[in-house]
Amino acid sequence: MAELDFVFNTGAAWTDLLGTLRYPYTEDPLDRLTSPERLAEWFAAVGLAPTAPPGDDDLALAQATREALRTLATGALGLPLPPGSPDAEQAVRVLGGVGAPGSVFELAGSDALRPRNPADTRAALARIVASATTDLGHHPQDFGQCSDPGCRKIYLDASHVRKACCDTCSTRLRVRAYRERTKRA
């Protein structure tokens, strides 16, 4: 897997959006949202492709929204913020500026209902913010943070058992623990 590949293993679109910034707790995080085209690709992958393609301002808004959501999530889960994260007041301004998701469904035929593509990036982000707000407001205990210090990704864990977001991080944790045990022995 290439470093810039999107990863969809966290259980929710908003946590996958957080995952577009890899290694947020390190001095050199890796941003996978590097262009409006990459943002459009990510939206399409999560089923929120906006009708109007994203531009440079939309990319900046998506990155700001992602980091504001990280502030919201870490606060709701009682976790420390990564360096350079917006404080709560800044996060409130960003998330409030995204707005309401608008109409999310449309009639398809005489009695079929289907999701409507968002009109633009702001509408797509509004749906993500609404989802995060609902998840964190109703069941924050179902989210965890990866124990791998290099990752620290937030993920859905209704089982409350997992220690890592994915098999790769789980393997890294097991190998690290094994090496520590053998070093002490």
Image (spheres, rainbow, N blue to C red):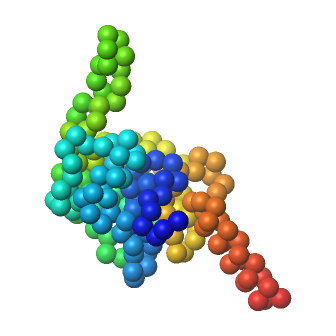
* Quadrant in the rendering for residue 172: bottom right
Can see residue 148? Answer: yes
Residue in the picture at 35% in, 20% down = 113
Q: Position of residue 39 (x, y in %)?
A: 30, 56
For residue 70, side relative to residue 92 (left or right): right
Can see residue 96? Answer: no
Give the farthest residue toward the top: 110
* Location of residue 60 with respect to 182 vertically, above or below: above
* Quadrant in the rendering for residue 88: bottom left
Give the farthest residue toward the right: 185
Q: Position of residue 111 (x, y in %)?
A: 35, 12
For residue 53, side relative to residue 66 (left or right): left
* Location of residue 13 with respect to 3 vertically, above or below: above
* Quadrant in the rendering for residue 36: bottom left
Residue in the picture at 46% in, 70% down = 3
* Location of residue 116 with respect to 25 vertically, above or below: above
Residue in the picture at 73% in, 83% down = 179
Count every numbered label the image shows and give the total: 0
Q: Position of residue 117 (x, y in %)?
A: 28, 36
